[in-house]
Image (cartoon, rainbow, N blue to C red):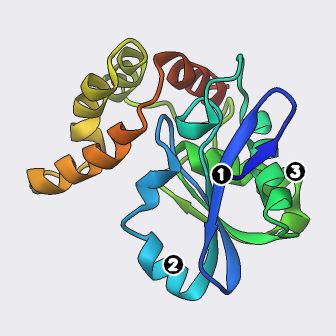
């Protein structure tokens, strides 16, 4: 398995497909395997690069605190390890915060920027509604299965078939997120 060495962390990454490079950055508490539904289509046209953010999955839980800037530097280290001077950068949720920081701090590394389900972060950012904010905080003290179940109303549209949710759970829980890693990511993305 390839890793990008960051000194305080070894960032696990994988690359597949051929074509222009696309760097995929996922959200709070999720391993990069969560791109599984999109990978077949992306790999058919692009060289996709994905990685487990610090605190999650095969990257493990290096000591905190984490910051969006640190996680953006991790993303750039992954591009370096993959031998890519630049890529189309896709960020979802917290991954969108990281992607925005990559674009701000290393604009020469970003061919295009795709942001999904995210926000700009920082002091002027709109806060979560109270119920969503409490769920994010509560998840830091739950087992991975409990955390996944608690997120269902916030992650899935009403009427999503339970079979689809369960399939996502099987992928997500195959490499569970340690509560400490989740907490470190949550605190870093709230700055």
Image coords of residue 168 (percent x, y): 28, 50
Task: Tell me which label, 2 or 3, sits earlier in the chain.
Answer: 2
Q: Secondary structure at mark 1?
A: loop
Is residue 103 depicted above or below 134 in this figure? below
Q: Residue at x 33, y 16 (%)?
A: 142
Q: Is residue 138 left or right of residue 87?
A: left
Q: Is residue 187 left or right of residue 128?
A: right
Label 3: which residue? 105
Between 119 and 44, the residue placed more toward the observer is: 44
Quadrant assignment for the C terminus: top right
Which numbered dot is residue 108?
A: none
Task: Tell me which label, 1 or 3, sits earlier in the chain.
Answer: 1
Q: Residue furthest front?
A: 1
Between 106 and 123, the residue placed more toward the observer is: 106
Categorize mark 2 by other alpha carbons within 10 Å: few (<14), some (14-19), many (20+).
some
Q: Residue 23: which quarter of the image?
A: bottom right
Q: Secondary structure at mark 3?
A: helix
Separation (CA) of disc 1 from disc 3:
28 Å
Label 2: which residue? 42
Task: Tell me which label, 2 or 1, sits earlier in the chain.
Answer: 1
Label 1: which residue? 1
Is residue 144 depicted above or below 58 in this figure? above
């Amino acid at each position: 398995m390839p890793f990008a060495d960051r000194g305080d962390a070894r960032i696990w990454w994988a690359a597949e497909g051929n074509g222009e490079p696309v760097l995929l950055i996922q959200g709070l508490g999720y391993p990069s395997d969560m791109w599984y539904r999109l990978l077949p289509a992306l790999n058919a046209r692009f060289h996709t690069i994905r990685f487990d953010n610090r605190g999650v999955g095969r990257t493990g839980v290096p000591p905190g605190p984490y910051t969006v800037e640190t996680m953006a530097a991790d993303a750039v280290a992954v591009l370096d390890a993959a031998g890519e001077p630049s890529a189309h950068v896709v960020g979802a949720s917290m991954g969108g915060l990281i992607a925005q920081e990559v674009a701000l701090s290393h604009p020469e590394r970003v061919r295009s920027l795709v942001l999904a389900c995210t926000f700009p972060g920082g002091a002027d950012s709109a806060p979560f509604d109270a119920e969503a904010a409490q769920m994010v905080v509560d998840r830091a003290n739950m087992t991975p299965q409990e955390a996944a179940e608690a997120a269902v109303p916030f992650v899935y549209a009403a009427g999503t078939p339970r079979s689809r949710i369960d399939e996502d759970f099987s992928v997500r829980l195959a490499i569970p997120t340690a509560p400490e890693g989740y907490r470190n990511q949550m605190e870093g993305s709230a700055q």
